[in-house]
Amino acid sequence: MSLAAYRHLLRAARIAFQGDVHVLSAAQNQIRQTFQENRALDSSSSIQTAIRHAEDVATILRENVVQGQKVESDDNNDTYKLRIHKHTERGDNDSILTAGNAKSSSGCGCN
């Protein structure tokens, strides 16, 4: 079970940091180091907690981390190109669209 979490975490890092060798290498080293430190866990509950944490981190890396790269341009505008991949979570704007439509409950009658 911990081997599967380890693989999921390495795969998620590879997806999130594809093309950025330095960050990918640092992430892989951090993953290895953390799993080595947790190798001596002895209670079943602490092992399950550590595995759940690793799976949660893998999900966040895979779905919520988006890298940006600065694009050189002739004008002095800072422009970035985002690397959004098929695993990136794309939310909807429903909460933003309906945020201003709520009626005021203060009863003051001001509009």
Image (spheres, helix red, strand yellow):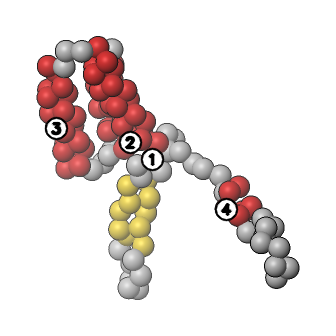
Amino acid on which the number 4 mark rests in the picture: Ile
Residue 4 position in % (x across, y down): 33, 19
Please indicate whether residue 7 sits to the left or right of residue 90 in the image: left
Amino acid on which the number 1 mark rests in the picture: Asn
Q: Nearer the viewer, mark 2 or mark 4?
A: 4
Amino acid on which the number 2 mark rests in the picture: Leu
Tell me the distance, in whole angstroms, between the alpha carbons under discs 2 and 1: 6 Å
Res 3 visible? no
Q: Residue at x 27, y 50 (%)?
A: 20
Q: Nearer the viewer, mark 3 or mark 4?
A: 4
Please indicate whether residue 91 sits to the left or right of residue 97 in the image: left
Which dot marks residue 6?
none
Disc on the earlier residue, 2 or 3:
3
Residue 109 position in % (x across, y down): 85, 79
The residue labelled by disc 4 is 96
Residue 111 vs residue 29, the one in the foreground: 111
Q: Is residue 104 above or below residue 13?
A: below
Residue 97 position in % (x across, y down): 72, 62
Disc on the earlier residue, 1 or 3:
3
The residue labelled by disc 3 is 29
